[in-house]
Amino acid sequence: MRFNEIASADDQLALWRLISDNVWSAVIAQAKEQARLKAQIAATPKPKRIKPKKIVPKKPPAPKPKPPAPKPPPPKSPVPQQARVRGVDFDESFVAELIGNYFIRKEMHVEPKISDAMAIYLHESDAGDGRKFKGDVLHVFRRFSSLVGDLNLCDLRYVHACIFRDHLLSLGLKPVTVRKQTAILNAMLNVAFRCLDIDRLSPFRALKISGEDERRPMPVITHDLLLAVKKKLMTRFKPYKLIGLIQLNTGLRLSEPVYARVEDCVFDHPIPHIWIRKNALSNRKNKSSIRAVPLVGVSLFAAKRLVEMAKCEGSEWLVPQYAHYHGSNSCSAIMSKYLADLDFRSHMFRHALIDRMKACNDIPTRLAESITGHSSGGSDFNNYGTVGYTLEQKLEVLNRISI
């Protein structure tokens, strides 16, 4: 029902009052109810809520910063401690190292001996595979070790070299022969010391040998003497005589034709020649010793005769009678004996050829050395080139000086 439906103002006012009173009564009742509920709630005791405590790990205290370390003082230069040994001052560290190395070697039983030096020398030497070279080294080693024993290298002294030298001289050996044998030991020890890092000198170094400077001077070899020698060698041919005739116009060392093979003599060539090279009996230690030498005059004749004799015997060696160890020594002895009345020895053929080349006064030294097998070193120019001196050049020289 709307207010405008009641026409009377009094009725409308009465209705309004009725509605207003009811509304306010409801509001007041609701407010009282709420106040009562609040009072009741407030009177009721509330249970205490216990909140769980959170366990928070304590942080370790931060390390206190260390105070900066003081700078060390600059190192002082160490003063080496000295140790006096037989009146000489040495650093203690140096002496301690020597003593330590000595006891280490002694405990390990690895102290090298003279026999070890010989084995190293045979292994390291360029001529170590040659039979003659091995034989010479073994012969000298056995003679020396039988006299003083197989000593440790550290125990080897100069007095041992003197004992060996005096022993050889007492056997009647010539000073030249004694020097050759001591030279083998000297070379053997030098190689061993180098390979074993032993810092010392060989006791055979500069060893004095009594009478070494008193060698018999070589007589002057004249043209007439050579003609007399040639004449004597041209009778009743024997192998040693033919060898001497080969030497006459080639200047070869005695061992070079003695230890040559038949194939080393080349006759089917415009310039007949003989090759000097390494084989089972001879080891050419120097490159300059390996060469081809033309055969001229009586030397060519002698070489052909020796080849014929070797083929008749079915031998591959030019002189089968001397194709053995020490064959060169045997040939030298018999030839020197045969020419003793002329006071001529086999090595004089070589000196005589060089005298004749020098007398020409225009033969280059290097060309002469290519014939004799010498090497005098010189500048790097001498080591360059691929051919060297030819047979034609050598033949021209030998034709000028042949006997």
Image: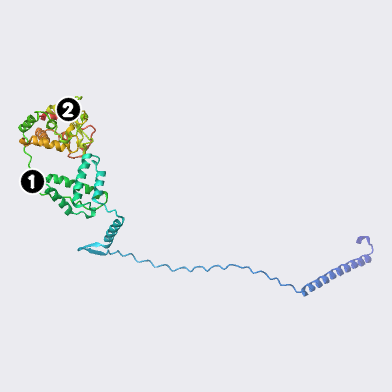
Q: Amino acid at mark 1?
A: Glu
Residue 214 badge = 1
Q: Quadrant of residue 270?
A: top left
Mark 1 or 2, nearer chain start: 1
In-front residue for pair 33/336? 336
Q: Nearer the viewer, residue 96 or 118?
A: 118
- Mark 2 Cα-neighbour bin, 10 Å: few <14, some 14–19, many ≥20: some
Give percent across and percent down for residue 145.
20, 50
Q: In the rendered view, would you say 366 is above or below 85? A: above
Residue occupying the point 17% across, 53% down = 160
* Residue 56, percent from left and from top: 60, 67
Image coordinates for residue 378, horizontal then vertical, percent: 18, 40
Instruction: Inspect the image, locate mark 2, and give the three-letter code of the amino acid beneath it.
Output: Met
Describe the element under mark 1 as helix, strand or loop.
Answer: helix
Residue on which disc 2 sits: 309
Name the side, left or right, on which 253 lies relative to 56. Answer: left
Q: How many marks?
A: 2
The 10 Å Cα crowd at callout 1, few under 14, some 14 to 19, many 20 or more, is few
Please determine whether, in this image, residue 201 is positioned above or below residue 224: below
